[in-house]
Image: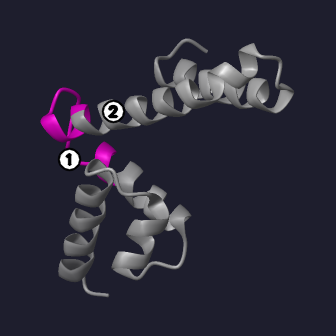
Amino acid sequence: MRAEERRGRDDLVLRMFLGGASYRQIARRVGLRSPQSVSNIVRRELRSGAGPGTPVTEVGRAVFVERLEALLAAVWPGAMAGDHQAGEECLQLLSQLARFYGLT
């Protein structure tokens, strides 16, 4: 793939991510083999060229946190009701949020 084509693909990947598409949906749309490839592109795009405080970086961060918080809200009631698996999922999500905010 030429650099120009890759740039276009990566821009589309980031736009789809910011629009709320899942990694699997994005991979299928742009012809990537795995959601991990999409994850790698999203991380690279959010880190490159867009320094702290730029709209793309801030929107990307907000989307990430919003998604984690939505997942946490979905499993929290089960954890509070004593569901061990839900509790483990909550701990994983809280750990990701803590790393994101630099608390660990």
- Residue found at x 44% / y 72%: 27
Q: Mark 2 = which residue?
A: 61
- Residue found at x 47% / y 56%: 39
In screen coordinates, is 86 left or right of 69?
Answer: right
Q: Mark 1 = which residue?
A: 49
C-beta proximity under 8 Å, tags 2 and 1? no
The span shown in magenta is 45-58
Please state the horizontal and vertical placement of residue 70, each as a whole percent of the image: 47, 31
Callout 2, which amino acid? Arg
Crowding around mark 2 (Cα neighbors within 10 Å: few <14, some 14 to 19, many 20+) is some
In screen coordinates, is 43 left or right of 86?
Answer: left
Please state the horizontal and vertical placement of residue 72, each as a whole percent of the image: 57, 26
Dot 2: element: helix
Please state the horizontal and vertical placement of residue 102, each as a whole percent of the image: 50, 16
- Residue found at x 32% / y 43%: 47
Crowding around mark 1 (Cα neighbors within 10 Å: few <14, some 14 to 19, many 20+) is few
In screen coordinates, is 57 left or right of 27?
Answer: left
